[in-house]
Image: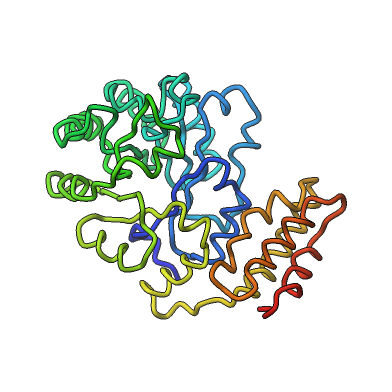
Amino acid sequence: MIDYTTPPRVSIAPMMDWTDRHCRYFLRLLSPSSVLYTEMVTAAAIHHGDSDRFLRFHESEHPLALQLGGSDPEWMASATRSAAAYGYDEININVGCPSDRVQSGQFGACLMAQPEVVAKCFAAMQEQTDIPITIKSRIGIDDKDSDEFLREFIDILAAAGCAKFVVHARIAILDGLSPKENRTIPPLNYDRVYRLKRDYPALQIVINGGLSEIAQVDSVLQHVDGAMIGRQAYHQPYFLAELERHFSPQYELPDRGDIVEAMLPYIESVLAQGESLGRVTRHMLGLYAGQPGARAWRRYISEHAYRDGAGTEVLVNALNAMPQAA
């Protein structure tokens, strides 16, 4: 049994266009205890749109956090009420995304320069629910690249009552770098996040950015409370199973073929709802990364999943197409 009374030390990052509900269902099969995060959903989308489209999830996804983007306290509070009704375990405020679209909406990483606005959103949200409201940020933005800037941001939000911060250990360059470049070009600075934990021992500090090996995760957990895995979890999802086994030796590593089999009933239910096979299988392409037959697995799915009438037989045939089937 998973002990949910202790916050899991590993979480899976919110990743736009990637960590949708289908992806999260798949990743949960590989990682029973990690905290899953949704891709960012804007408060405006929930406020004006079909909330069920943005908020529904499968019960197996718990523990699950919703990441919200926005800067209007009223809309953020409204979205929080909706999310609480759906049963999320945590609601996370996005103060880290550097995209132009997010900046034009006055939220994401640019809000690091406006901590008072974030504090107002936090307070309005926390009034709506007992669910923990948390914040995901960078270590700085543009020329605001110092311990002092980060501490000032944390001070204001901690005073508002925030007890958990997920910190991407890079600054965000808001003018001149694309979102993709912002994930790789600014150098990682784990030491700044470590100092943050030393300065604020009562806060829960989770580190994010560049974690792709078990030894790295072990290392950062000597200094902070949690490790958030991003692109490695998506491109090589079996890494999550290996990480689970590392921290819980009683956990039996699943066979990749068994993971595929476990996905089939879920996929059937998704197809019955009118969604295409490719909406799910695109998240499964990396399951065999680094294994014999990985290229054949990816190629067969990519060529067949989007054809009219494609069903679960595509995954079965993809397994059979591999030189060494699972």
**Residue at x-position 80% and y-position 45%:** 274
Task: Estimate the x, y position of residue 224 in percent, counting from the top left.
Answer: 23, 55
Counting from the top left corner in percent of width and height, residue 125 is at: 40, 30
Location of the C terminus by quadrant is bottom right
Residue 5 location, quadrant? bottom left
Q: Is residue 49 above or below residue 283?
A: above
**Colouring of the image:** rainbow
User: Which image quarter holds the N terminus?
Assistant: bottom left
Instruction: Judge whether 156 appears above or below 311 on screen.
Output: above
x and y percent of residue 267 in the render? 73, 58
**Foreground of the two, 34 or 242:** 242
- On the rendered structure, is 223 left or right of 125? left
Q: Residue at x 70, y 74 (%)?
A: 322
Q: Residue 188 or 121: which is nearer the viewer?
A: 188
252 displayed left or right of 55: left
Instruction: Give the residue displayed 55% in from the left and 76% down from the top.
Output: 254
The answer to whether residue 272 is above or below residue 295 is above
List x then y, in percent, for residue 57. 60, 48
